[in-house]
Image (cartoon, rainbow, N blue to C red):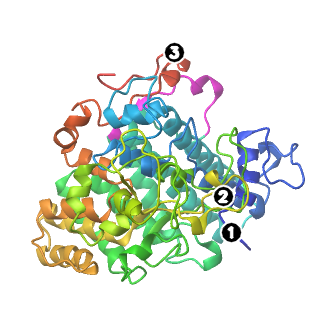
Amino acid sequence: MKQFKLYIGIAVIGAGILTGCSKSFLELTPRGTELEANFYRNEDELAQGLVAVYDVMGWGTSGGYTMKMPLLTAASDEAYAGGSDASDQPNWVAYDNFTLDPQRGPQVGLWQKNYSGVYKANLLLEKLEGSTSISETFRMRAESEAKFLRAYFYFDLVRFFGKIPLILGPISSDQLYSFPQSEPQDIYAQIEKDLNEARPGLPATVPVNENGRITRGAATALLGKVIIFQNNDGRMLEAAQLLQEVNSGGVYQLLTNFGDIFRPDNKFNAESILEIQHSNLAAWGDWGWINGGEGNVGVQFIGAADYNGNVYSNGWGFCPITLDLVEAMKDDPRFEFTIVDGKKMKAEGATYNARYQNTDYFIRKYAPQKAYRSTVGTSEINWPYNEIEIRLADTYLLEAEALVRGGGDAGRAKSLLDAVRGRVGLGSVAPSLDNIYNERRLELATEGHRFFDLVRTGKAAAVLADQGFTSGKNEVLPIPQVEIDVTNKTLIQNPNY
């Protein structure tokens, strides 16, 4: 493949063909006659199909605003929903206070997004298998990437919904509305199968012009994480071995300065293992078209509303930080890179308007900074901030956890935990599970990990009790009622919804 950039200029061409959408964004020459039947004829067209699968990872407006990082931050004890009032984004408020029901919540968008990704990955895999005009080198890598991406989408689906349909290829129209749900263990087994088959065909590193493509390290890290999330202590050393491949392989390293990890001008840095690309190159300006642009609208969401000052740009006031997280981090060196202190901003001359659930503390890691505000298109939906899904500190702490839970090398677990702490000048602590989980809370705060960590460790019911979390129910979202209705109740609703 000559060039592979995960930007909308290529992605929408593929996406438009795959979805049959009537809008063809950034197509200089209309391609209305190019349909699935006469596409995928060569490596260039198959490459466009692959980029279209990648493109789904960055969707944040499918079925409403469903940007994963801020949404999961609001669902956890790290932040509230916020916004102008409780009716601003009722689906976010429902997740924040666990008043979810089959019609209310973020489930429609999350379901649509991830099954769109599964569909596109399945379609591409089918076309790759049937193609006789491509090299084996191209086929192997493209299949590996497609299988990783299918595993990625199913990992989100099983964590968000539990029992879901497991679709691994094209299905007929009569099957479309009668496809049964599979048990979570079967979903996890398929995710592991896809990742194990993907790893050998992926490169250890990629050149700069291919930043954003999946590497072997990303697949290995995700596989280790998937095993840990199944909570089988008998497999923890298996997960630890996989994560050690990533952590000791020499490809990644902890950045010396914690704050450098999240700088928009430091994308794909040495600590980043899996990163979702966003840009303002699309210059999108249409509020009405779902999944239209490549910018990260989550950045706009979390900024202080009507901000006027030197550093930040005006935001919408979502996800104000809880005072619990402020208290937990107040003496931590990572505080200034994790949390914006609004009272301090005001003391320095800035102003902003308090909105719903305001605490005067805001997310810092992805805060909208004036220096990166787009000058093209509609600025609010063209923020060029990437999302780091997996980074080295995450995999260090996951390996340490797996070693402790599996009865492995306690000395190595301690060195991994100490490395994360030492990077910000903190001293050594014992490698207990409590210390490891607390370090995950502080190190990874507001990056979208906390809610699922609470669920998988069995702590969600206690920690989120004052938000209304109900054990045996809120570990997963409800299945969208529209999906149950359209399948004539083939799909069974999750318990207690």
Residues rendered magenta in the picture: 170-184
| Residue to which mark 3 is pinned | 488
Relative depth, front residue between 239 and 363? 363
Q: Earlier in the sequence, mark 1 or mark 2?
A: 1
The reply to whether callout 1 and callout 3 are in contact (CB within 8 Å) is no
SS for callout 2 = helix
Q: Amino acid at mark 3?
A: Asn
| Residue 342 within the segment the image draws in magenta | no
Q: Amino acid at mark 2?
A: Val
- Residue 357 in the image, given as x and y percentages of width and height: 36, 40
SS for callout 1 = loop
- Residue 271 in the image, given as x and y percentages of width and height: 41, 75
| Residue to which mark 1 is pinned | 4
Q: Earlier in the sequence, mark 2 or mark 3?
A: 2
Quadrant housing the C terminus = top left
- Residue 253 in the image, given as x and y percentages of width and height: 38, 81
* Quarter location, residue 175: top right
The reply to whether callout 1 and callout 2 are in contact (CB within 8 Å) is yes
Q: Residue at x 75, y 46 (%)?
A: 16
| Residue to which mark 2 is pinned | 51
